[in-house]
């Protein structure tokens, strides 16, 4: 029985030493990543200029399910707008389903709208499903092209 007690004490002592060694080794390894690199030094050879990067705002694109125009008329009472807060000007085009562009605006500033538009040709009465409003976007800072969008709508000409 005395031998069992000595054996159990020895096994317990060895287990404790192994556990303690594992903790010490693990702590030492974990500390290496946070230690400064002694080979690193301050660089005085080159100065790097940094300028803050502006995060672009999103562009709000209005959607229309349907626009109604008068057959045979060149001037149409149609309101197209560029939502306030947009970081860009809009150039809005109306394109028929066959690809014919019948209207192209000038630059529309954010918060501005058209009251009337002038078509390039009179339209015949009918329903033009799949017509496209094309939004070409240009930066308000330098008029550089930005992302645009094509939205489909139904053009009802009466």
Image (tube, rainbow, N blue to C red):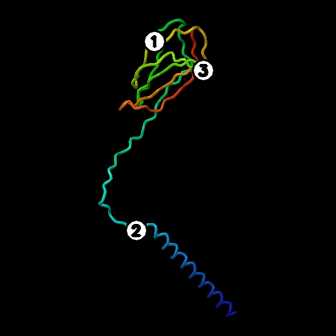
**Mark number, residue 138:** none
**From what the image shows, is residue 12 above or below residue 118?**
below
Label tally: 3
Going by the image, does 87 lie left or right of 24? left
**Mark number, residue 130:** 3
**From what the image shows, is residue 68 above or below residue 6?**
above
> SS at mark 3?
strand
Q: Quadrant of residue 153?
A: top right
| Residue occupied by mark 2 | 37
Q: Nearer the viewer, mark 1 or mark 2?
A: 1
Q: Earlier in the sequence, mark 1 or mark 2?
A: 2
User: For this rendering, which residue is in front, 80 or 3?
Assistant: 80
**From what the image shows, is residue 13 above or below residue 39?**
below
> SS at mark 2?
loop
| Residue occupied by mark 1 | 118
How far apart, in angstroms, are the residues tagged by discs 3 and 2? 64 Å
User: For this rendering, which residue is in front, 142 or 108?
Assistant: 142
Q: Earlier in the sequence, mark 3 or mark 2?
A: 2
Residue 126 x/y as whole percent: 60, 10
């Amino acid at each position: 029985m005395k031998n069992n007690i000595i054996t159990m004490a020895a096994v317990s002592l060895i287990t404790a030493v192994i556990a303690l060694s594992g903790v010490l080794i693990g702590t030492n390894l974990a500390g290496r990543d946070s230690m400064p690199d002694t080979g690193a030094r301050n660089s005085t050879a080159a100065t790097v200029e940094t300028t803050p990067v502006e995060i672009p705002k999103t562009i709000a694109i209005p959607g229309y399910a349907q626009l109604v125009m008068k057959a045979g008329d060149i001037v149409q009472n149609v309101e197209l707008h560029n939502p306030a807060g947009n970081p860009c000007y809009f150039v809005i085009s109306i394109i028929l389903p066959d690809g014919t562009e019948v209207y192209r605006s000038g630059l529309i500033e954010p918060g501005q709208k058209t009251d009337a538009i002038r078509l390039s040709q009179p339209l015949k009465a009918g329903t033009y499903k799949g017509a496209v409003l094309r939004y070409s976007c240009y930066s308000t800072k330098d008029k550089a092209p930005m992302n645009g969008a094509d939205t489909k709508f139904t053009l009802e000409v009466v």
